[in-house]
Image (cartoon, rainbow, N blue to C red):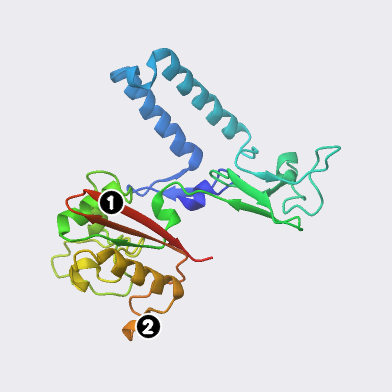
Amino acid sequence: MRVVSHDPTCRATIELADGSHLTAVELQWEFLRLARKYADDIGLDMCGGDDVGGMVLDRWERGLAALESDPMTLDGAILRVDPVTGAGLSGNPMFGSADANARRIIAAGLRNPFRFTFRPGTDEIWVGDVGQGLIEELDFVELHDAYTSSEIQTYEDLGLCRYGEGGRFVEEGNPFMPGIDYGLTGANGRFPLTKVGTLPVNPSGGLLACGHSIGATGLMQSVFAFWQLQGRIKNHLGSASLQVKNPKRGLIHSHAGTGTYITVTIMEKT
């Protein structure tokens, strides 16, 4: 999905579960078809009524039609142009393109570039490109796993996966550390483990492995997260097998009581 969402030509494809390949625009047409079906079958009372909901669907359709006819739009792009003529400058990466819009672009495919600025004293643009989901913004999670059902529920509560899909999230291997044998790929092939390492959760082993030292578990999580960001897991554990590769940002989730006090901390290496 990252490749598709960053493609300014709208021609990159993503493979679906049935083996078919669709571009971002084709995916959006399918989503629009399903949205119209929902509107016909159930109505749009929860979306502001038929007038408001219908207007949104119509604008959605017009936007897709425009993308199909001219995919090189300026949405989600940063431009560098001549302030007098509005034409792209010769140093732009696509200046040789026949498309006037392409010649103006120096960066494209930004999903939500609402944080941007110039680096002081330079002409460098710095952009905070926000991801579509929490997983894209994190490299690992240290999560309060006092018992298994709570851990899976917290995957969903944190937005690591959809509600009701915590079990599948585990079975696909998303929270596993690459290179670690979890003993779940036996002869019965019960767990597909097709997405190992998407977002490693509890590379420390979590509360269940470190001992549930009531009142101090958050400190334990913070220490392990700090070691991860330092890249010094091997120094402390004698092995690098639990070291996340090049981590920049990690989330720590801890709670006291039965969800009475919840603390979420994000640590980032700068």
Q: Nearer the viewer, residue 72 or 179?
A: 179
Q: Which residue is mark 1?
A: 262
Does 162 sit left or right of 11 as displayed? left
Q: Secondary structure at mark 2?
A: helix
Residue 159: x and y, percent? 33, 47
Decide: few, some or many residues near mark 1? Use Cα within 10 Å; few <14, some 14-19, many ≥20. Answer: few
The residue lying at 39 percent from left, 46 percent from top is: 20
Residue at the limit of the structure toward the left, as seen here: 188
Q: Nearer the viewer, residue 187 or 221?
A: 221
Q: Which residue is mark 2?
A: 234
> Residue 184 got which mark?
none
Residue at the limit of the structure toward the front, as seen here: 215
Q: Does 61 appear above or below 230?
A: above
Q: Nearer the viewer, residue 152 or 39?
A: 152
Nearer the observer: mark 2 or 1; the answer is 1
The residue lying at 64 percent from left, 44 percent from top is: 77
Residue 238: x and y, percent? 33, 86
Q: Secondary structure at mark 1?
A: strand
Q: Nearer the viewer, residue 12 or 252?
A: 252
The residue lying at 39 percent from left, 28 percent from top is: 33
Does 53 sit left or right of 130 as displayed? left
Q: Count up the numbered dots.
A: 2
Does 85 sit left or right of 101 as displayed? right
Residue 93: x and y, percent? 72, 54
- The kind of residue tagged 2 is Lys
Q: Does 110 appear above or below 48?
A: below
